[in-house]
């Protein structure tokens, strides 16, 4: 679990990277959505995102990470995962890289054939579930039952939700606390946030949720404030000070881990400086300031050091990193910056790329293949109708391009490695 976060978390990111690399090389790598808007895969006035979106002793952070019940590092990272993936055919490998949305208004059986035929690896609950723990648990129990040797090669499903708090709280009702916005959470101490997140995490685990697409690691400058469409407008940021955000992110991660739930920092490399919401527009989504050593990367670096389980890459465009390319499809951002410079070895997931307007001009299948080409792992697509096209695009490209097939295998290995730590898979 993270220990005290240095108050200089916003020193040049390059300085943070030194300690990050050391932390990641200890043999306990963690794989580790959230959308650009309060409703990353849902666009509602109440911002129920499809995700988009520490610890204690005063201010805890991530110097020493204690393995959690859900993310205990394997003795030999990825060796067992590699063996499992070797036994999967191309369609099964591709399926592990897809997460689909299940809306509250849909039948809980509506994804059964899709999961089975496309061997899907994950489901995210969307649309705002107000039935309380009992209603959510009935659905997640059904989803758990879809995992079988034939449908998913025996690998359990990641079942995710956007449970940030405030405008972005997908699960409500009896058994779920009313969670304040991150802006409010950020006013308290890191130790208080860790304790609260532990309680919220236990509620999610009781309801059968094993992945929270939170916390938000974006920083919105005070000068922009609510003019920032995806984050500032809804108070989804812990603070306008990246140092403060870098203190609270590890606390949220540590609390959720203690509660038995995997976490996701989002939306890399940060969507706090844009004005457009990538879920609902392709305008105003270019960040012309963020650089590879930007202080606003410090909260993401802190999350990595705290051994977050997943990192979500957003759909904004960064003119100083790779002009004209959405972040999720940018090798410069996904591989060179996140995996290379920040040293993150784990699972990378997209924000919603099924319904988001920011990527609407890109063919559906290409959204999946371009993300994997860039170095990513899990493609999150809210509309079930997009999944067959994405799955076919991945498997077709695998058959035609051995280098791409190798990238799929590597991505599937990272996903299965995380599932092993989450106890959603067993070593053969």
Image: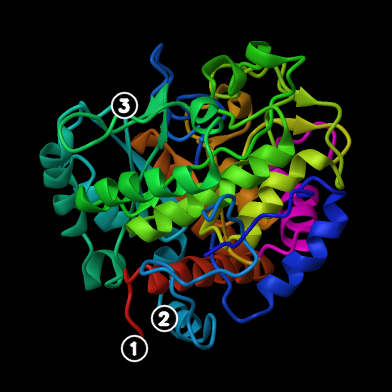
Q: Residue furthest front?
A: 58
Q: Is residue 48 left or right of residue 137?
A: right
Residue interval drawn in magenta: 322-344
Of the image marks 1 and 3, the number of the one nearer the N terminus: 3
Q: Where does label 1 land, which residue? A: 428
Please say if 240 is above or below 350.
above
Residue 127 shows which numbered tag? 3
Mark 2 vs mark 3: give the one in front: 3
Location of the C terminus by quadrant is bottom left
Say what secondary structure mark 2 lies in. helix
**Residue 188 horizontal/vertical position (percent):** 52, 34
Please say if 48 is above or below 135.
above
Residue 84 shows which numbered tag? 2
What's the residue at 19%, 39% (across, down)? 110
Task: Find out whether the residues at labels 2 and 3 contact each other: C-beta distance under 8 Å.
Answer: no
Residues 200 and 163: in front is 200
Of the image marks 2 and 3, the number of the one nearer the N terminus: 2
What's the residue at 47%, 43% (across, down)? 193
Q: Is residue 247 left or right of residue 141?
A: right
Name the magenta segment's main secondary structure.
helix
Give the spatial CA distance, label 2 vs label 3: 34 Å
Task: Find out whether the residues at labels 1 and 2 contact each other: C-beta distance under 8 Å.
Answer: yes
How dense is the environment of label 1, judged by Cα within 10 Å: few (below 14), some, or many (20 and up)?
Answer: few
**Residue 223 horizontal/vertical position (percent):** 77, 14
Quarter residue 84 falls in:
bottom left
């Amino acid at each position: 679990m993270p220990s005290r976060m240095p108050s200089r978390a916003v020193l040049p990111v390059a300085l943070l990277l030194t300690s990050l690399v050391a932390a990641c090389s200890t043999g306990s790598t963690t794989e580790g959505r959230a959308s650009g808007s309060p409703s990353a895969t849902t666009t509602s006035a109440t911002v129920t995102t499809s995700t988009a979106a520490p610890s204690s002793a005063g201010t805890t952070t991530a110097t020493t990470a204690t393995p959690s019940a859900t993310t205990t590092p394997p003795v030999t990272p990825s060796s067992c995962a590699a063996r499992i993936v070797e036994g999967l055919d191309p369609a099964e490998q591709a399926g592990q890289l897809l997460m689909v949305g299940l809306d509250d208004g849909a039948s809980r059986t509506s994804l059964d054939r899709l999961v089975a035929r496309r061997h899907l690896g994950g489901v995210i609950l969307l649309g705002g579930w107000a039935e309380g723990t009992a209603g959510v648990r009935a659905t997640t129990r059904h989803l758990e039952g879809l995992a079988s040797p034939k449908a998913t090669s025996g690998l359990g499903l990641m079942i995710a939700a956007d449970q940030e708090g405030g405008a972005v709280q997908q699960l409500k009702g009896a058994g779920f606390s009313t969670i304040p916005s991150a802006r409010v959470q950020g006013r308290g101490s890191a130790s208080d946030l860790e304790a609260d997140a532990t309680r919220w995490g236990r509620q999610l685990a009781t309801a059968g949720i094993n992945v929270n697409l939170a916390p938000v690691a974006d920083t919105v400058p005070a000068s922009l404030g609510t003019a920032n469409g995806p984050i500032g407008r809804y108070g989804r940021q812990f603070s306008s000070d990246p140092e403060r955000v870098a203190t609270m992110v590890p606390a949220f991660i540590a609390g959720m881990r203690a509660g038995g739930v995997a976490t996701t920092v989002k939306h890399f490399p940060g969507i706090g400086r844009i004005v457009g919401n990538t879920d609902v527009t392709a305008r105003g989504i270019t960040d012309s300031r963020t650089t590879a050593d930007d202080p606003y990367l410090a909260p993401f670096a802190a999350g990595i050091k705290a051994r977050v389980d997943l990192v979500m890459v957003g759909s904004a465009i960064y003119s100083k990193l790779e002009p004209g390319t959405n972040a999720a499809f940018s090798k410069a951002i996904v591989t060179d910056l996140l995996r290379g410079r920040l040293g993150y070895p784990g699972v990378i997931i997209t924000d919603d790329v099924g319904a988001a307007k920011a990527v609407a001009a890109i063919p559906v299948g290409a959204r999946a293949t371009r993300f994997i080409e860039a170095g990513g792992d899990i493609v999150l697509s809210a509309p079930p109708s997009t999944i067959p096209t994405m799955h076919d695009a991945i498997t077709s490209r695998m058959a035609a391009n051995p280098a791409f097939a190798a990238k799929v295998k590597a991505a599937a290995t990272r996903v299965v490695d995380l599932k092993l730590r989450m106890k959603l898979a067993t070593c053969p």
